[in-house]
Amino acid sequence: MAASGAVEPGPPGAAVAPSPAPAPPPAPDHLFRPISAEDEEQQPTEIESLCMNCYCNGMTRLLLTKIPFFREIIVSSFSCEHCGWNNTEIQSAGRIQDQGVRYTLSVRALEDMNREVVKTDSAATRIPELDFEIPAFSQKGALTTVEGLITRAISGLEQDQPARRANKDATAERIDEFIVKLKELKQVASPFTLIIDDPSGNSFVENPHAPQKDDALVITHYNRTRQQEEMLGLQEEAPAEKPEEEDLRNEVLQFSTNCPECNAPAQTNMKLVQIPHFKEVIIMATNCENCGHRTNEVKSGGAVEPLGTRITLHITDASDMTRDLLKSETCSVEIPELEFELGMAVLGGKFTTLEGLLKDIRELIIEGNMKAHFIMDDPAGNSYLQNVYAPEDDPEMKVERYKRTFDQNEELGLNDMKTEGYEAGLAPQR
């Protein structure tokens, strides 16, 4: 048998105007105070509201309170002095929990009837011994006791009994018999089991021995079913359809831009290139037909590597000038023998040859006047110098992976970037 719990004759009041002299807002830490009859400062907020029963003005009272060993709740109460209609309900002040909760209480003595209970409107209540159930969403949420839950159920069943008896409904007598059984439960004539099952995880049954274990109370947390998720309005996101992957390696993409010199409309060509034994890079070239300005730039197709890269090439022959070279915008270049150093981001990103990068000092190196070392140091790890012996090691080239210094991470903007564990700083809502 199920009880609708429709004790209230109408919907709750609708707020129309606040009190004329509202008190200043309390500090956030004092918004939700532990519920206590001795706390004189804990006063409800009163709001003049429209009674939906007689359409006169009544009064809504809101109390923000905290249940010990549970969480914050909002208790709202409406009363109308004109028609006498009143209504009380509670709402959780937090979010829907990650898991549902089921409280199974073995009621053995009258003291158990006084246990505090928070029952949200999404919770179902069952008493297996009587095959009795109050379905979810059939009653408003309530801050009550075990006895109060049973009393509320009795009131719901008695509400329509006069009409049933007048119509000589056959179920009226059976309901009367069942109400007698519920009233016997209030006296705890025999032990019974009370189960409150709330998929939202926001219901509560008091443990009078807290923080010690309560042998009469079993709390079970569980993962919600798909049906329960839908009941709570938690729609699962439909799996995103995977778009058809386009192979951009063989295509040159074009997009409109403005010339950096004359600001005239220009076209930029962009192509994705896979460098053998390295990674993918993006090459962009802009050609302005108005002023003739040309520019090309190379961007890494990947993220900042965990370790920086230092590539040292010993230039011993003119053929070394033909090696392919990718210099990212975070890479610096050094030639110790010439006391030459090119700082980070001076030339931007370039995909060229060693000769192309060193055109200003090309003549000295090619003529063989001296042998030199060419060092590329990229803390982002996104630069590359061709190994002409690949996949074998190059005897004239050394590639080192190193851990970045604090200053290098600062230049790359990585010191203030947090990509892992940032959830840990968020306090869980209760």
Image (cartoon, rainbow, N blue to C red):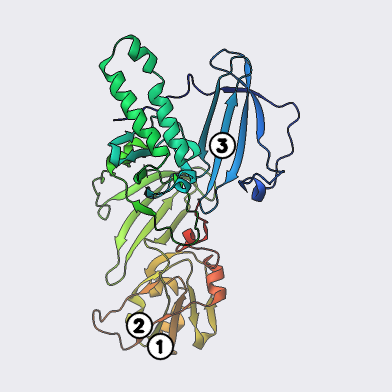
Which callout, 3 or 1, points to the residue nearer the camera?
A: 3
Mark found first going from the N terminus, 2 or 1: 2
Q: Residue type at mark 1?
A: Gly
* Residue placed under numbered mark 3 in the picture: 75
Q: Are marks 2 and 3 in contact (CB under 8 Å)?
A: no
Left or right, 13 with reference to 325? right
Callout 1: SS: loop
Residues at marks 2 and 1, CA–CA distance in whole angstroms: 8 Å
The picture places residue 91, in percent across and down from the top left corner, at: 51, 37
Count neighbours of disc 1 (C-alpha within 10 A) and say few if under 14, some if 14 to 19, many if 20 or more. Answer: few
Q: Residue type at mark 3?
A: Val
Reply above or below: 417 against 148.
Answer: below
* Residue placed under numbered mark 1 in the picture: 368
Left or right, 143 with reference to 122? right
The picture places residue 299, in percent across and down from the top left corner, at: 41, 61
* Residue placed under numbered mark 2 in the picture: 318
The picture places residue 153, in percent across and down from the top left corner, at: 40, 31
Q: Are marks 2 and 1 in contact (CB under 8 Å)?
A: yes
Q: Are marks 3 and 1 in contact (CB under 8 Å)?
A: no
Count neighbours of disc 3 (C-alpha within 10 A) and say few if under 14, some if 14 to 19, many if 20 or more. Answer: many
Mark found first going from the N terminus, 3 or 1: 3
Query: In the depicted view, which residue is nearer to us: 411 or 116?
Result: 116
Residue at the spot 50% in from the left edge and 47% down from the top edge: 259
